[in-house]
Image (spheres, rainbow, N blue to C red):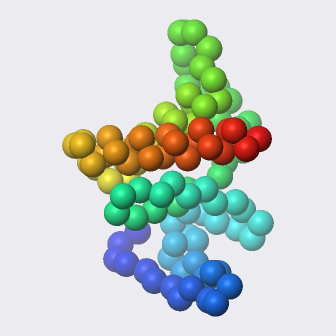
Amino acid sequence: MEGLAESVITSKGQTTLPKKVRDALGLQPGDKLRYAVLNKGVLMLKVQPIESLKGILHYDGPPKTLEDMQRGIIEGATEWFTGRGDAEEEEARRTAGHAVAEEAARK
């Protein structure tokens, strides 16, 4: 997606995602979004059903916990999205990891 897009936050904290954002993420009505709060912004990802991932990765090591997998997803997405490789990225990963742990504790 080229260029920037913006929208307005309503008094209820709602916004309409610009069409170019919806198109870039392949969003349809009813889709869910996941947000990772970083130091300098927010990473927004379309939630994919876990079934869509079956068989795409081959791993021969010991089993991973759901928290380990969520942390890895956030770390990979953060690295891909930001292109960072410095201390700021590490802080973003720690922050995102805490959010994953808090979410898991609520469940």
For the point 53% across and 9% down, the residue is 61
- In the rendered view, would you say 57 is above or below 7? above
Query: Is residue 73 something that shows in the picture?
Result: no
- In the rendered view, would you say 86 is above or below 38? above
Residue 36 image position (x, y, % from top left): 51, 54
Residue 52 image position (x, y, % from top left): 69, 39
Residue 38 image position (x, y, % from top left): 41, 56
For the point 64% across and 35% down, the residue is 53
Foreground pick, 4 / 7: 7
Q: The N terminus is located in which quarter? A: bottom left
Q: How many marks?
A: 0
Foreground pick, 3 / 13: 13
Horizontal side, residue 43 vs residue 84: left or right:
right
Q: The C terminus is located in which quarter? A: top right
Horizontal side, residue 82 vs residue 27: left or right:
left
For the point 52% across and 42% down, the residue is 98
- In the rendered view, would you say 99 is above or below 1? above
For the point 35% across and 72% down, the residue is 2
